[in-house]
Amino acid sequence: MRTLIVNIKTLAGVCSGEAIRLQGAQMAQLGQIENAWLLVEDEHIAGYGEMSTCPTHHQQADIEVDATGCMVLPSWCDPHTHIVYAGSREAEFVDKIKGMSYAEIARRGGGILNSADLLHTLSEEQLYNQAVTRAWEMIRKGTGCIEIKSGYGLNTADELKMLRVIQRMKETLPVHIVSTFLGAHAVGRQYTQPQYVDLIVNEMIPEVGKERLADYIDVFCDKGFFTTDETSRILEAGARWGMRPKIHADELASSGGVEVGVAHHALSVDHLESMADEQIETLRGSDTMPTALPGTSFFLNMPFAPGRKMIDAGLGLAVASDYNPGSTPSGDMKFVVSLACIKMRLLPEEAINAATLNAAYAMGLSKEYGSITVGKVANFFITTPIPSVSFIPYAYTSPLINRVFLRGKEV
């Protein structure tokens, strides 16, 4: 099946096959072709170029789409979500309005623990139905790759239940999904912290590994959650089962999470709202992608990760939604791109690269996704008619995504 998109105002996110991530000044380079065409064969990008070089009658397409006045970009990649959860937490939203902090809500037994209590009462089928609704919401807003974490189970049976739901989503949805085991999201109510860490290492990780339910492993390494020593122990156990780290780091305090992540060759360290200059130096030269979650800062009235400073220091940067019921009940990556520009001072080109190629890297997927590149999976969207790439983050609530293609097919 051949699909040919013609008369594209701007084809953006064009990148050579050699680039798997962008760093420093590279992040401001968003490859663009004006008045362009894009050819898809089956699930992959087969070619592109200026309309003057568009395939002629000898290479007819099965489907032709006229994108006059519109732009085509690679689908957003969202490398940090928690979309398998039970119900909402709007009562805590009101608590935050009244002045209670995220940490205070957690200390009184709310937050993650409330989500775990509710998840325990739901079946896999109920969880799957809720999560699929959220995933389709993200797909329609232009997201083509999603990382999904467990972490609202907090006991072996419920963590496995979450991961089996994610596995089913992998098998049934057109979006590409990777799974992350986050048993160390908080301490289950019935355990002391040492008991719970033992449970994760000695029971949860082997069970997850035997069923091959997780691509990655995560730990909430932060003040009031898991220590650096506990994090190292958990990550080492996960590595024995082939799970590379993607960890929560430096959200609530500069607590050593970045250092632990780099030491264990984490694919990404995420949040970073409280990171200091020392952590930027730790990341320099590593293969770990710093990943900012500006929607969390927006929703919780927290500082934003120092994205501008990281890029100016020569680092790469990815952004993600953190879609979850407590701190970021939104999976709108276009809004994340806008926040990256408005609050983190990224240029539009930098923010788009952070939400596409670099975000794909933070999921281990940038060889196949995240850019308009011949041979990559054909995940892209067509905008409504817009004047420029910068208009995408500028018009921060306007619904600009008109048509979505995943694996070469319109969804």
Image (spheres, grey):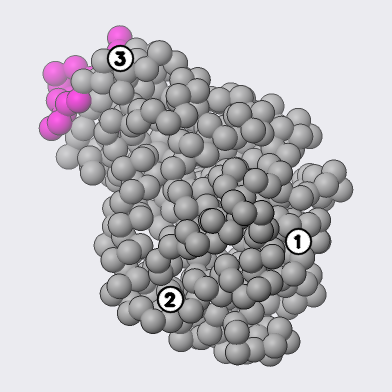
| Mark positioned earlier in the residue sequence (1 or 3) | 3
Picture coordinates of residue 118, whole percent (x, y): 44, 76
Return the x and y of residue 67 as percentages of the image width and height.
26, 20
Q: Is residue 91 left or right of residue 26?
A: left
Residue type at mark 1 is: Gly
The 10 Å Cα crowd at callout 3, few under 14, some 14 to 19, many 20 or more, is some
Q: Which residue is mark 3?
A: 69
Q: Say which of marks 3 and 2 sits in front.
A: 2
C-beta proximity under 8 Å, tags 3 and 2: no
**Nearer the viewer's eye, disc 1 or disc 2?**
2
Q: Is residue 344 above or below residue 280?
A: above
- Range of residues picked out in magenta: 46-65
Q: Residue 257 got which mark?
A: 1
Q: Earlier in the sequence, mark 1 or mark 2?
A: 2
Where is residue 211, by image quadrant? bottom left
Name the element at disc 3: loop
Q: Is residue 13 visible?
A: no
Q: Is residue 266 magenta?
A: no
Q: Is residue 50 a member of the stretch shown in magenta?
A: yes
Q: Is residue 144 above or below residue 9?
A: below
Q: Which residue is mark 2?
A: 119
Residue sitting at 50 percent across and 76 percent down? 116
The residues tagged by marks 1 and 2 sit, at their Cα atoms, a distance apart of 28 Å
Cα distance in 3D space between marks 1 and 3: 46 Å
